[in-house]
Image (cartoon, rainbow, N blue to C red):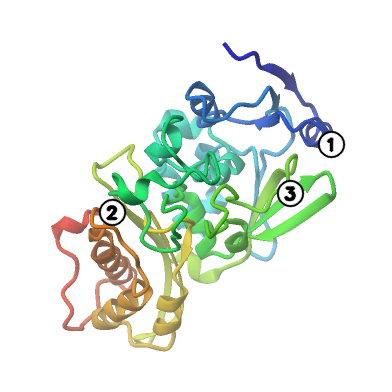
Amino acid sequence: MRPITYFRATDTATAVTAVSTDPTSDFLAGGTTEVDLLRQNVLNPRRLVDINDLPLTDVEGTPAGGVRIGALARMSDVAAAPVVRERFPLIAQALELGASAQLRNMASMGGNLLQRVRCSYFRDAESPCNKREPGTGCSAIEGFSRGHAVLGTSEHCIATHPSDVAVALVALDAQVRTAGPHGERTYAIDDFFLLPGDSPHREHPLEHGELITGIEVPATPVARHSHYLKVRDRASYEFALVSVAAALSVVDGVIADVRMALGGVATKPWRARRAEDFLIGARARRDNFAMAARAEMADARPTPMNAFKVELAQRAIVRVLDLLSDGTGDGSEPGPGPGAGSPS
C-alpha cells in the first residue's frame, strides 16, 4: 500500500500554493483518469489536492460571439449548453462522442485536456516507456502500434493524444488560461500541446502547480456550420482511430473559410494547416477535398500496423468536407465507402 494524503482546496490561490510548494502533490478534479493511473502505479503522488470546490464551472457566451468555459465545467454540461450548441456544434459533438454519459458527468474540461495517453505500454508499469520513464525507450515502435500516431512522431514516442474535444478546440484557435506560482498565463491551444521530440515526457508547457482555470474560444462565425466525425472500431465508448473536426464556409461554390483539425493520427491534436491552405479559394469539389487530404497526410510516418490510418484519415477528411458542402462536391474522386465508418 502507498499512503496518499488528501487536501480539499476552497480557492484557486490555495490550490496553486498547495501543489506548487510540494513536488509530490497533484491536482484532483473529476479523477476519471488519475485514479486509474494511481491504481496502475503509473502516477505516484503522495498528496492529492481536490479542486472541485473552486468556482470554475461557468459556461458563458462572450459579447463578441465566442464562449468562455471554466476548467471545472463538466463535459456533459458544456455539451448541453445552448451557447455551445448554437455557436460551436463541433465542440458539443466532440464531447458527446468522447466518453460514456457517466464519464461525461464526472470529467472536467481542464482534466480532459491534460489526460494522459492511452498507450498500453505507458499504462503497463513494467514496459519501457519514455513518457513514464525518460530514456527507457518506446515499446510501441516495435510493438503493437495499431492505434498509434502517424503524424508528429519521433524516435522516442508515437503515442496519440486521446482527447476528442481538444481536436475541436485546436480547429477553433482556442486559448487556455492558467493560474500558477508566477501568476496568470494564456496559451494558444496549438502551443499548449507539445510534440514528443526528444522529451516525450513533457506533454504541455505547464510548470508544477500551474492550474488550468478556463478555456476561451474566440468568435468564429464559420463554426456554426461545423461537424466532428469520429471513426473507431466500435460505435460507442471507444477512442478514435481517426477523427476530423471541421468548419466550412462556401460562397458561390468557392471555399471562403475552413478550419480543420485531426485526432487519432498524431501525437497532439493536429491542426490541418496544409489542407486549410490548399482549400481556401478553391472550388468546393470532392477532387479538391481529396487533394487537400493527401497534402495534409504527405508527411505521415506509419508503422506496418497503422499504415491504414493514412488512407482512412484522407477518406474521413473528404467525407466531412463533402457533408459540410451539402454533398455537392462534383469532382471525380470517389467518396469514402462503408469501411471508413460513419458519423455517430
Q: Residue at x 53, y 46 (%)?
A: 135
Residue type pointed to by label 3: Thr
Q: Crowding at label 3, few (<14), some or many (≥20) Cα neighbours within 10 Å? A: some
Which residue type carries mark 1? Answer: Ala
Q: Are marks 2 and 1 in contact (CB under 8 Å)?
A: no
Q: Is residue 37 left or right of residue 3?
A: left
- Single out the mark in the foreground, 2 or 3: 3
Residue that carries the numbered disc 3 in the rendered image: 178
Q: SS for tag 2?
A: loop
> Helix or strand or loop: what does disc 1 sit on?
helix
Residue 230 is marked as none
Dot 2 crowding, Cα within 10 Å, few <14, some 14–19, many 20+: some
Q: Nearer the viewer, residue 340 or 249?
A: 340
Query: Which residue in the structure is indicated by mark 1?
Result: 13
Q: Nearer the viewer, mark 2 or mark 1?
A: 1
Q: Position of residue 212 (x, y in %)?
A: 69, 45
The quarter in which the N terminus is drawn is top right
Q: Quadrant of residue 333?
A: bottom left
